[in-house]
Image (cartoon, rainbow, N blue to C red):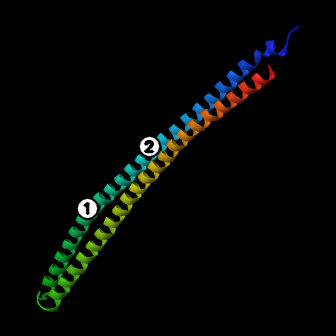
Amino acid sequence: MITLSFIFGGAEIWAGLSALAGIFGTVQQVQSQRAAAKQAEYDAEYEAQVREQEAEQERLNREEAEKSEREMTERRRAQQKSSYAKSGVLLEGTPLNLLAEQAETDELNIQQRNLESRQRQKSLRQAGRAALASGRYKASANRSAATGSLIGGLAKTGMKSYESYKWWEANH
């Protein structure tokens, strides 16, 4: 007579297949978590690079803007001096004071925009460093989870295999 153990290959085979399935599932989970760790590191490094490039572009843009502002300010001063001269006003006293005050105001405005630009650059760089730290933390957490999954999965598979063995011993 054909028994179920003959058809299904016996409990030993099923216990072995169960153990292999458990190990395979654990390996898949560990690989997935390790891949997530690598992706988190990659994403963080990319984000940090983008923020650094944005900060550098901000610096370059401000340098160019400052150059243009200084040229425009100098042209305006020259036009004002020329206008005063054409109208017969001497560049002494009040007209000279007005030009000096305007030059001081122009310089303060340029310095204020430079300061704002440096603050934006600093903020972009800090955002890049924060993204990098966060990504490294996520990667570390994923690697720790992978290690935990490996240990837990192998322990669970071992326990199930042991239980199957004990059941088999008790029933045969």
Total marks in image? 2
Q: Is residue 63 left or right of residue 146?
A: left
User: Residue 129's quadrant in the figure?
Assistant: bottom left
Relative to the observer, which residue lies in front, 122 or 115? 122
Quarter in which the C terminus is drawn: top right
Write down the residue under mark 2: 42
Residue placed furthest toward the bottom: 93
Q: Mark 1 belongs to which amino acid?
A: Glu
Q: Is residue 56 left or right of residue 139?
A: left
Q: Is residue 64 above or below residue 138?
A: below
User: Residue 105's quadrant in the figure?
Assistant: bottom left
Label 2 and label 1: CA atoms lie apart by 32 Å
Q: Which residue corresponds to the image point at 39% horizontal and 54% vertical from the top-left? A: 51
Relative to the observer, which residue lies in front, 64 or 136? 136
> Measured from the top left, where is residue 126 in percent x and y?
38, 60
Q: Mark 2 belongs to which amino acid?
A: Tyr
The secondary element bearing badge 1 is classed as helix
**Earlier residue among tags 2 and 1:** 2
